[in-house]
Image: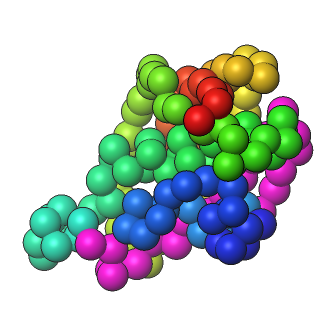
Amino acid sequence: MDINEIMKVIPHRYPFLLVDKIVDFVPKERIVGIKNVTMNEPFFQGHFPGHPIFPGALLIEAMAQVGCILMFKSFDLSPEKFVVYFMGIDKARFRKPVRPGDTVKFVLTPTVIKSKMSKMKGEAFVEDSLVAEAEIMAMITRK
């Protein structure tokens, strides 16, 4: 999926759309999304001046957006009729900083996936290094 397809599935838009493309997808089993981190990101002005670091909270948000795409596509849901809500996060860990110029690969695998709720293991990598991980929970509901 390219960015145009992603924007047909999830409601997020700049500056809060944090997924550039989906490179692998197996319904109800796995999804891999990519975020290209550039110095143009608005949060780098204050996080941190002279030492830009991609905020950990936004790594988790990007992970959740990739998970949202997994749910929409796995259950063939219409974004006009349904919304996916981020419900919780467990076991979040940040291993290494992410900086401008990095490409982050988000790998999400469901541990529980149902038509109304899911729990997924999420991992974020830069090259082959694990930079963040978390378990995220989400719920599908009608708008």
x and y percent of residue 20 in the render? 60, 69
**Toward which corner of the image does residue 23 lie, by quadrant?**
bottom right
| Residue pictured at 68% horizontal, 48% vertical | 79
Is residue 124 visible in the rendered structure shown here?
no
Vertical relation: 9 (above or below) 107 = below
| Residue in front for this viewpoint, 95 or 60 | 60
- Furthest-bottom residue in view? 40
Vertical relation: 81 (above or below) 59 = above
Is residue 40 visible in the rendered structure shown here?
yes
x and y percent of residue 39 in the render? 33, 80
Q: Is residue 52 left or right of residue 66?
A: left
Q: In this view, does 19 lie to the left or right of 37?
A: right
| Residue pictured at 41% horizontal, 60% vertical | 16
Visual colour scheme: rainbow
Q: Is residue 67 left or right of residue 5?
A: left
Q: Give the range drawn in magenta.
A: 23-42
| Residue pictured at 42% horizontal, 29% vertical | 92
The quarter of the image holding the C terminus is top right
| Residue in front for this viewpoint, 71 or 122 | 71
Q: In this view, does 65 lie to the left or right of 81?
A: left
The quarter of the image holding the N terminus is bottom right
Vertical relation: 47 (above or below) 29 = below
| Residue in front for this viewpoint, 125 or 81 | 81
x and y percent of residue 52 in the render? 23, 69
| Residue pictured at 44% horizontal, 45% vertical | 61
Residue 29 included in the magenta stretch of the image: yes
Residue 125 included in the magenta stretch of the image: no
